Amino acid sequence: MQVQGQVAIVTGGGSGMGAATARALTQAGAKVAVFDINSAAAQKVADEIGGLAVVCDVSNAQSGEQAIATVKSQLGIPRICVNCAGVLLAQRIVGREGAMSLEAFSRVINVNLIGTFNMMRLFAAELMQEGVATLNASGERGVIINTASVAAFDGQIGQSAYSASKGGVVALALPAAREFSKFGIRVMTIAPGLIETPMLGSLSPEAQASLAASVPFPSRLGRPDEYAKLALHILDNEILNGEVIRLDGAIRLAPK
């Protein structure tokens, strides 16, 4: 897909990998809508890139529908959707204070998995409508890039909710790609490893250094712009479809 001139949605665009992707898409010539539940964060990034800030709770059907409608009315039909919105929970299934609350587990599933599915279904539905033009000789109409995690494959103790949510995102890739194929919509998933994001930023410098040293090569934390570079390559390379790409420096997480 040629990114120049296309309308793009980035969820979780107010920080981290989402913000880096919004910047990269803008530099490539896209018109970017920055979705985030944090209105101030979304507006800050949108102001920086000349994009559109949209407050959106990805896990809420009505909020998602309204956000998509706003993009259509102000920018046009979106052709790119990069789902970066997510939350992290570090908690054992059964800890010293007893079993993890079902509410805590549900919140992670609702944002990370259901939120991804919600935006994916709404985005794809727009492109499947009669009269939506294809973009190239292959008949491509749009691309969805979802964000999983290496925790989907080798989750650590205390990551049960997060791993389950990201494992669900991994499992969505192939069936969605197969279903959407006749409409020219590709679905890809990136599974980042240890990336310098606000989630890791809450750790002490010592803890971050220890994590960085655990990455085989390069022995450092990944950068949000490296996620964005991969997202742009996926958009450009139309044979990439229905697959999950680990972006992790060959790390495999230890049990704890």
Image: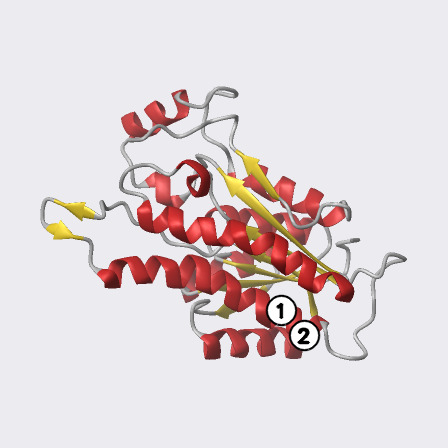
* Residue 80 at least partly seen: yes
Q: Please say if the residues under marks 1 and 2 sit with CB atoms less than 8 Å apart.
A: yes
Q: Horizontally, is 161 left or right of 102 in the view?
A: right
In percent of width and height, residue 211 lies at 36, 27
Left or right: 230 in relation to 246: right
What's the amino acid at mark 2? Glu
Measuring 23% from the left and 48% from the top, which residue is drawn there? 93
Label of residue 126 in the image: 2
Residue at screen point 46% across, 24% down: 220
Q: Which mark is residue 211?
A: none
Q: How many marks?
A: 2
Farthest residue, direction left: 97
Category of crowding for the residue at label 2, using alpha-carbon neighbours closer than 10 angstroms: few (below 14), some (14–19), many (at least 20) = some
Q: Amino acid at mark 1?
A: Phe
Q: Give neighbour class at mark 1: few <14, some 14-19, many 20+ (Cα, 10 Å).
A: many
Q: Secondary structure at mark 1?
A: helix
User: Can you identify the residue that label 1 sits on?
Assistant: 123
Q: Is residue 211 above or below residue 98?
A: above
Q: Nearer the viewer, residue 119 or 109?
A: 109
Whether residue 15 is visible here, answered yes or no, is no
- Residue plotted at (35% across, 28% down): 254
Image position of 55 (left or right of 241)? left
Residue 247 vs 241, above or below: the answer is above
Depth check, front residue: 100 or 86:
100
Measured as percent of width and height from the top left, residue 240 is found at 72, 45
Q: Is residue 167 above or below residue 137?
A: above
Q: Position of residue 192 (x, y in %)?
A: 50, 39
In front of the other: 154 or 34: 154
**Helix, strand or loop under label 2:** helix
Judged left or right of residue 112, residue 157 is left
Find the distance from the CA under tag 1 to the CA under tag 2: 6 Å
Image quarter in which the C terminus is found: top left
